[in-house]
Amino acid sequence: MHLLVVTTRSDRSETAVYGALVARGHTVTVLCQPDTPEAATLAASGVNVIPNRIRHRLDLTAVYTMRRICRRLNPDVIYAPRNDSLSITLLATSGKHPAIVGYRGTIGHISRWDPAAWLTYLHPRVARILCVSEAVRTYLLEFNLPKNRLVTIHKGHDVAWYDAMPKPTRADLGLPADAFLVGFTGRMRPVKGGDVLLRAIANIPPERKVHLVMVGAIDDPLVQQLAASPPLRDRIHRLGHRTDAAAIATLFDAFAMPSIEREGLPRAVIEAMSQRVAPIVTSVGGMPELVVNGVSGLIIPPRDAGALAAAIESLASDPIHCRQLGNAARTRIESHFNIRHTIAKMESLFLHAMHAPPPEERPRTPA
């Protein structure tokens, strides 16, 4: 099989998949931005890397470049794991070209009345859509897409990635040595429920020494306001954007992801679980697929600061149970979200797509 990947970037899991497919005897070519950081790693694993800058989903220069490359390479399957790369792929190909596989990692932001949706996920020429969680697949079924077109494959990780990372100490980051640290990693937007998390911390008595560490940009004005308020500012540590965010997670006693909607399968939670950090997540999107409540973490209702505060206090007051949950969280990643499983399932997906009957060429109009 010759797989052509059209993308703008490649995360660690994707990079591992492409290299593993080469090791299994397949040919993999990746079209990506000229400055993609993973290009050297991909090339070292035997992947053919071709630069092709995509500025937006209607970038005609990228379309023409890809069209020439497709004619020259004649791949069996095209995988486009980004919104803009999927649009470019559909514009650059026709029904005579290989099977096209897309990717969806989040819930929401698709409408039958949005032309952009018909240039990506709702286009009938997309043979398969890889869904990062069953929750994402269920969401896409609402648009009457054929069931066999939607395939759930959890994005796997390797715990060894995190064991090998150089890790900072609390002293390095100015974090209190004697506090129970609750961590949050990621870009804090309103959908992440940051205000709920801060209100939960405020509900916990200061003498419990529960502190919150926030790693990543804060794009929610309400969170910025709450974090700077006198009752909280001495217990909130805002580290901003960090390239070593995954390594910092090992310093946490617990990890909170209080999202209120649209979660697919958050990587930050997987990174924390891989490092034996007990997760507290809401019953939103794919997170209940990731965490077994009471076994490998805690699941609480969204928008419930009281429930979140109670969950944090329960772990802070019982360090043995907190460590048990953290150890089980790592085991959960090793057994159910291992990159080896992802590689095997994606290989099967691409091979089935290659041999499947071609879908219809002309897109349907919204009803």
Image (cartoon, rainbow, N blue to C red):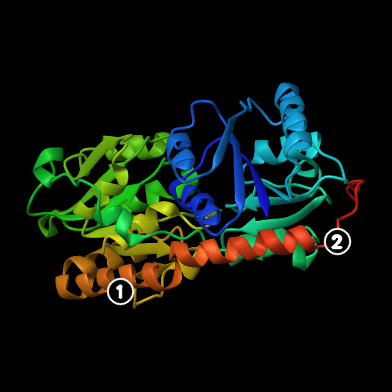
Residue 226 placement: quadrant: top left
Relative depth, front residue between 344 and 290: 344
Q: Position of residue 264 (x, y in %)?
A: 54, 56
At x 70%, y 26%, the residue is 62
Q: Residue furthest front?
A: 25
Q: Residue furthest bottom?
A: 295
Instruction: State left or right for residue 106 relative to residue 234.
Output: right
Q: Is residue 272 above or below residue 307?
A: above
Q: Check disc 1 and report its element: helix, strand or loop.
A: helix
Q: Is residue 8 above or below residue 275?
A: above
Confirm or deny contact between disc 1 and disc 2 (CB under 8 A): no
* Quadrant of image for the N terminus: bottom right
Q: Nearer the viewer, mark 1 or mark 2?
A: 2
> Circle 2 sits on which residue?
357
At x 31%, y 48%, the residue is 246
At x 71%, y 25%, the residue is 59
Q: Residues within 10 Å of mark 2 (few under 14, many from 20)?
A: few
Residue 326 placement: quadrant: bottom left
Q: Amino acid at mark 1?
A: Ala
Relative depth, front residue between 244 and 16: 16
Q: Position of residue 154 (x, y in %)?
A: 53, 63
Q: Position of residue 18 (x, y in %)?
A: 53, 50
Relative depth, front residue between 184 and 275: 275
> Circle 1 sits on which residue?
328
